[in-house]
Image (cartoon, grey):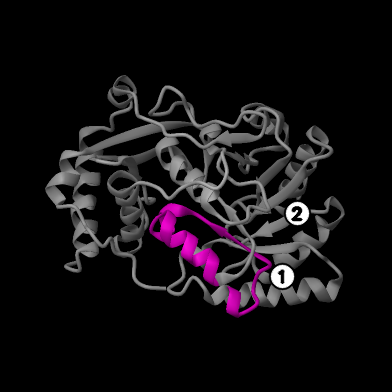
């Protein structure tokens, strides 16, 4: 794929003038995150979000800035559908907290369950999955390991979870070669769980290599890490694999980009991981993009000025994000 670089990059001064940095508390800890910080951009086409996680370097963060610029300065492609099916997401909580987490999503028919959390055991994962199955006997269940398992641990875990009939396992191990090896080992054992690639697509130098290597049955795509909706659409088209659209723990402004991607795909065979605003204790808009009856409507969102003020990041964090914006803008301009 071509490098992520907007064809019409706004001047840095315009981005800085349009920026608001917010800090949004989480209802439950997710990816070691208890407070989600993002930088919001307002442009002629609306609002965009720049929210790469703090540990990402400037080169990786450049795709996220390109995505935010697309949203705020270019706008989204025309949708093919007006409603998007979404899954609930259960973080790596204790099994007894599962009903509380699910309650925040309302009625859903698909649930993604985080597993392989550092410091937890396979027994913790199995108990969490079992708790979801008890709460929603007829739901389609997925697990997401965020590449947290070794090959041996993944084989053991997915064999143990086989009776649950998972819809798929998302990024159970690290790397494209690791996925391909695991996929073969599971087939040898008669475990028919599908394998989905996430990090191996969005964090790869070549996001299409996972398809060429036969390392996955489907891919998980996120608009921001891939450089925006249009580039994500190109990745899906070139990969030739079924795609699931997911979020990167976004506010409703960022979720709007995921909704635009899901709405523009030619085919949408799976529910999308775009209901994660339900994991947040607050939001930057008054009318959050939260699922209703397991779906999100395709609609625009506009931050509420009072919410932006209430959620404004501390001055030191504001400076940190604005400095990061300056550096990443230079990367996109070819000067970083």
Which image quadrant for residue 239?
bottom right
26 to 66, vertically: above or below: above
Mark 1 → mark 2, Cα distance in angstroms: 21 Å
Q: Residue 220 location in percent, x, y?
A: 57, 58
Mark 2 is surrounded, within 10 Å at the Cα level, by few (under 14), some (14 to 19) or many (20 or more) other residues, namely many
Q: Which residue sits furthest top?
A: 306
Question: SS class of the residue under badge 2?
Answer: loop
Q: Do the residues bearing badges 1 and 2 touch, measured as CB atoms within 8 Å?
A: no
Say which label, 1 or 2, has the lower sequence index.
1
274 to 151, vertically: above or below: above
Question: SS class of the residue under badge 1?
Answer: helix
Q: Residue 113 location in percent, x, y?
A: 67, 46
Q: In the rendered image, which residue does mark 2 sit on?
A: 167
Residue 108 lies in the magenta stretch: no
Give, as a single range, the part of the protein colored magenta.
211-238
Which image quadrant for residue 158?
bottom right
Q: Residue 282 location in percent, x, y?
A: 44, 26
Q: Residue 240 location in percent, x, y?
A: 60, 70
237 to 127, vertically: above or below: below
Q: Which mark is residue 152?
A: 1
Left of 150 or right of it: where is 2?
left
Residue positioned 62% across, 43% down in the render: 92
271 to 171, vertically: above or below: above
Q: Which residue sits furthest left?
A: 13
Seen from the viewer's position, the closer of residues 32 and 221 is 221
Seen from the viewer's position, the closer of residues 222 and 171 is 222
Q: Which mark is residue 101?
A: none
The image quadrant where one finds the N terminus is bottom left
């Amino acid at each position: 794929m071509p490098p992520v670089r907007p064809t019409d990059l706004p001047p840095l001064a315009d981005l800085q003038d349009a920026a608001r940095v917010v800090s949004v508390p989480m209802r439950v800890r997710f990816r070691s995150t208890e407070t989600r910080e993002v930088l919001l951009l307002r442009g002629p086409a609306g609002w965009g979000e720049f929210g790469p996680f703090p540990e990402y370097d400037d080169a990786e963060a450049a795709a996220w800035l390109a995505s935010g610029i697309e949203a705020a300065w270019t706008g989204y492609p025309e949708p093919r559908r007006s409603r998007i099916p979404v899954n609930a997401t259960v973080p790596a909580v204790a099994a007894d907290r599962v009903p509380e987490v699910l309650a925040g999503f309302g009625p859903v028919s698909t649930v993604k369950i985080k597993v392989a959390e550092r410091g937890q055991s396979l027994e913790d994962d199995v108990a969490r999955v079992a708790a979801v199955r008890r709460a929603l006997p007829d739901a389609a269940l997925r697990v997401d390991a965020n590449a947290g398992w070794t090959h041996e641990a993944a084989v053991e875990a997915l064999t143990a979870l086989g009776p649950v009939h998972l819809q798929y396992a998302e990024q159970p191990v690290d790397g494209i070669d690791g996925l391909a090896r695991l996929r073969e080992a599971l087939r040898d054992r008669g475990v028919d769980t599908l394998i989905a690639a996430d990090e191996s697509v969005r964090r790869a130098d070549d996001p299409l290599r996972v398809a060429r290597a036969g390392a996955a049955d489907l891919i998980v795509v996120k608009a921001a890490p891939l450089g925006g909706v249009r580039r994500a659409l190109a990745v899906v088209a070139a990969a030739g694999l079924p795609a699931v659209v997911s979020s990167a723990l976004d506010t409703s402004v960022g979720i709007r980009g995921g909704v635009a991607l899901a709405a523009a795909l030619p085919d949408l065979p799976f529910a999308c991981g775009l209901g994660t605003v339900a994991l947040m204790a607050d939001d930057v808009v008054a009318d959050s993009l939260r699922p209703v009856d397991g779906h999100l409507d395709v609609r625009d969102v506009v931050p509420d000025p009072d919410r932006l003020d209430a959620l404004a990041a501390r001055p030191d964090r504001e400076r940190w994000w604005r400095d990061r914006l300056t550096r990443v803008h230079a990367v996109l301009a070819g000067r970083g």
